[in-house]
Image (spheres, rainbow, N blue to C red):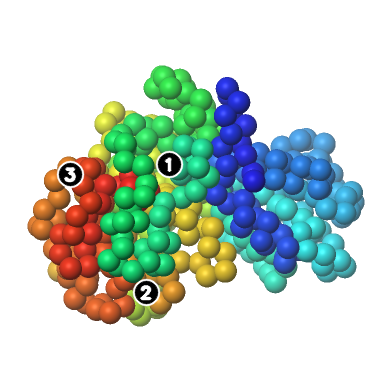
Amino acid sequence: MIIIHIMKGQLYPRFLTDSVHRLARTMPVVVITGARQTGKSTLVRDLLEGERDYFTLDDLDVLAQAERYPDDLVERSGAMVLDEVQRKPELLLAVKRSVDRNRVPGRFILTGSANLLLMKSVSESLAGRASYLTLWPMTRRERLGLGVAGRWSAFFDDDLESWPAVLDELESQPVDWRELARQGGFPVPALEFADPEDRAIWFDGYIRTYLERDLKDLSVIESLVDFRRLMGASCHRLGQLINQTELGRDVQLSQPTVRRWLNLLETSYQLVRLPAFSVNRTKRLIKTPKAYWADTGLALRLSGSREPGGQDLENLVFSDLLAWRESQVLDRPEVFYWRTAAGEEVDFVVEWRGRLLAVEVKVTRRPRTHDIRHLKTFQEEYGDGVVGCLLLHDGDKVEWLAPGILAAPWGRVV
């Protein structure tokens, strides 16, 4: 089991461990990507300790060899980890050549702080040779040392009538989602810093490193000040439709610049786009996505907000869904939002195994039937294709509000 070693000797398993092992038994290359500081380097070093050599492109000597003699670098070991490969994407061509000569499963574990599939220079380099995983910030249950995400699989595996019993199996102590949102899921601020000022200092350092270093590996930014303002403005719109023209007007940037910079935020796993659900899969690509942030603590710091709001609770739930989705390597679920032309909306729709789960998130301790009206519309629209609906709230009671619609404390699920 992979662990993160944290102060005071406590161990924190990561949910993605089994998925890495599973893919490495089959594919010659496993690529693990995610935002910087999610724990990728710790994961691969501990998981594969003694099995392969470790090289990071943050080491200037390794970076120089990757630039001048990439084929020599990839042949330095029969099995290796290459960390932060987005710093020299041309290295992937050398990996491709090496794999074509020797396709032994698990030869290369690559990590990067950018989505290589969205980088034009490398998107085709490893086609048919690699499987991809994303390590998202720690889930709430990972932070508790349980090494899991939420109970999403149970809603598809178990009968609808058994959902309350499944949720009753979990711990029932109150969960302060506002404090969890402030902490975020990056291991250091979430686990090591109890003082909000310490976390603020860490987040500020993260933002500066991202702006001044990580972005240079991806693109030329004409104005870091403007880019920083765009980050803040996007964090004020968590859970809202992405309107590039409106964003550009607010931060005084052209629409093409906003579009390019939002793509950079997505490529580097800061911004996460949530697509719209439609039975017509072509329409999913056309409809406007919503914007969330990979880490709630960083989003709050960027926005300057002192108090988390309902959008931050939504973001916590979405982050957990992303981590759970990533672990399902053989049959990966999809996550969407749903919205009608009349403005009826459901926060999240999970599509898995040909069935649909609708999830609404409300900051209320006493959910009412009024809160589920859009879930009812969704049920009526998709009928037997809906496995059930959830209304997640911050109260303490699990109860049926209507046939097929269960209200539950969010901490019982996430």
156 relative to 84, above or below: below
**Between discs 1 and 2, the one toward the N terminus:** 1
Q: Residue 355 carries which label?
A: 2
Q: Do the residues bearing badges 1 and 2 touch, measured as CB atoms within 8 Å?
A: no
Quadrant of the image occupied by residue 312: top left
Tag of residue 140: 1
Looking at the image, residue 36 lies above or below residue 122: above
**Residue 364 tag number:** 3
Secondary structure at badge 2 equals strand
Residue 138 image point, x, y percent? 49, 42
What amino acid is at disc 3?
Thr
Marks 1 & 3, CB-CB < 8 Å contact: no
| In this picture, residue 92 sits left or right of residue 166 | right
The residues tagged by marks 2 and 3 sit, at their Cα atoms, a distance apart of 28 Å
Quick one: label 2, few (<14), some, or many (20+) residues within 10 Å? some
Pointer 1 or 3: first along the chain: 1
The residue depicted at 31 percent of the width and 36 percent of the height is 173
Instruction: Give neighbour class at mark 1: few <14, some 14-19, many 20+ (Cα, 10 Å).
Output: many
Q: Is residue 242 visible?
A: no
Of residues 381 and 60, the one nearer the viewer is: 381
Q: Residue 81 carries which label?
A: none
Q: Residue at x 21, y 47 (%)?
A: 397
Of residue 190 and residue 2, the one placed in the foreground of this image is 2
- N-term mark: 2 or 3: 2
